[in-house]
Image: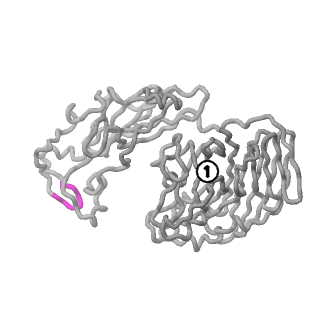
Amino acid sequence: MSTPRICLLPHCRLGGAAAAALYAAEAPPWANAHILGIHELPSHAVRHADPDEPAALAGTPSPLIQSLDGTGTVHWVPHPDQRPHDIWRPDSDGRTWCDLPIPSNGDMHGFGTPIYVNLTYPFANDPPRMMTDPPSSDSAFAERTPVGSYRRSFRLERDPAGREGMLTVRCALPNDTSWAPAGHVGAWDQLPFGGGWSPPPVRSGGRLEVETAPATYLMRGAEFEVRIGRASGVIESWTVQGWPILRAPLVPNDWRAPTDNDRGNQVPQWASVWRDAAAKRTVERCEVARRAADGAEIVALIKLPAGESRARYSYRVNGTGQIEIETRFEPAGAKLPLVPRVGLMTELAPDCTNVAWYGRGPHECYWDRKTGAAVGRYRSTVRELIYNDLKPQDNGHRTDVRWLEITDPSGRGLRVIGLPLFGFNAWPYRQRDLEGPMHPWRIPRRELVTLCLDAAQMGVGGDDSWGARTHPEYCIHPGRTLVHRLRIEPVNQ
């Protein structure tokens, strides 16, 4: 067991005359009239965890929710630079802290200077700032930007099995206001505890037959067949009880439909070598690396027409119908550009539109745009995953995913398990359909679902849209080997 300490540092809001937007960037955030809040979420329904579906439907209080209302402790300072740091550490000194009811107004409990809204403030307009310093003799001089640090301690039980846990802390409005309803979340954070993500163990049992033909390797279990092309080096078909899980081969994918930022910094031009590299791959060798009564491993070595780049794909199929895929991607060559994406892509039946996942969400999130997306369990549909930009581009990506299920109305479909993590997109059209149209309504809707399973995808950037590159720490660099593993298995109900 552990005793986490939660520190909530609210931003101070100051009222006053609006300044010209041209000069707004010159002021620090706490003195900028154009910044009304930082890291706030739009109004939405409150999300919380329940032990299971019946408990959620019953609407009973969830044992997984811990309210932070009650009695906490507070440390008040007149300026942000004086606030205590690392107050969540167990050894931090809290002897000078005072008790405070939560929620409450610190001004009404002797902290700071009471603020009366029916009086005129003695501060002159100073665009783009909210105010100048008040006279040093004024009672508010020493308390111009006060900060209250609040702390509440409680015990958190670790999962006996050592499974991954996420402590989510939300600061929500207790009552309706003129600008947001009760339950509106103004700030939140997540703290991992317990063990990290542990994939479920591989199932054992079942027998597997391997047949070698001139063009394919056919692996057959009691209720499934997996066919791997010797010339393509990929899974070309996969059926369970006669139902085709894949409606197209599971192929490498090193490209993404350019985003607006990509077009601004000329990614379609300087990274064009990757657009068709996977499609024009050459299989140097594809062979059975291991064969047993309950499983087999097929390994394909691939040469890509991008410098001296190579990839190794390993497919481990067991007798229960699970497939573990390991990708070893080695982009190499003189003056080889950054890689937009490393992953796999396939097509599913058009009615595989129900999506559930455990990872970041619920909204889209990318490598460099993910800290605003909480880790959790989510449900959606393929169409709801889409974000229609003004001009079509890659959209709807979810990252840091532990597992994904995508199924039809009967519950039949595909499960993907990260070993440990992956990212995904799902669309009712093909990836190349996003590169031609000028407007979302011109994207063709096809009788299929495209599924992208990513080891990595370059960040979207966004310092500006007319030339700024994605920051280096969010790029896939040549000369570095990327190894990624995931497990796929059928879902039958």
Task: Tell me which residue sits at (53%, 43%) in the image.
Answer: 379
Q: Quadrant of residue 457?
A: bottom right
- Give the main secondary structure of the magenta stretch: loop
Question: What percent of the width, then of the height, locates residue 397?
Answer: 54, 54
> Could you classify mark 1 by the number of other residues whose Cα lies within 10 Å: few (under 14), some (14-19), or many (20 or more)?
some
Q: Quadrant of residue 131?
A: bottom left
- Is the residue 266 above or below the residue 107 in the image? below
Q: Is residue 367 visible?
A: no
- Is the residue 12 above or below the residue 255 in the image? above
Residue 285 shown left or right of residue 457 in the figure: right
Number of disc labels: 1
Q: Nearer the viewer, residue 126 or 35?
A: 35
Residue 486 shown left or right of residue 106 in the figure: right
Q: Nearer the viewer, residue 480 or 321?
A: 321
Q: Amino acid at mark 1?
A: Asp
Question: What percent of the width, then of the height, locates residue 422?
Answer: 61, 49
Q: Residue furthest bottom?
A: 269
Task: Tell me which residue sits at (40%, 28%) in the image.
Answer: 153
Specify the color scheme. one colour
Residue bearing mark 1: 351
Question: What percent of the width, then of the height, locates residue 470?
Answer: 51, 63
Residue 246 lies in the magenta stretch: no
Magenta residues span: 125-132
Q: Is residue 248 visible?
A: yes
Q: Quadrant of residue 476?
A: bottom right
Which element carries disc 1, helix, strand or loop? loop
Residue 179 shown left or right of residue 411 in the figure: left
Question: What percent of the width, then of the height, locates residue 36?
Answer: 29, 52
Screen quadrant of the C terminus: top right
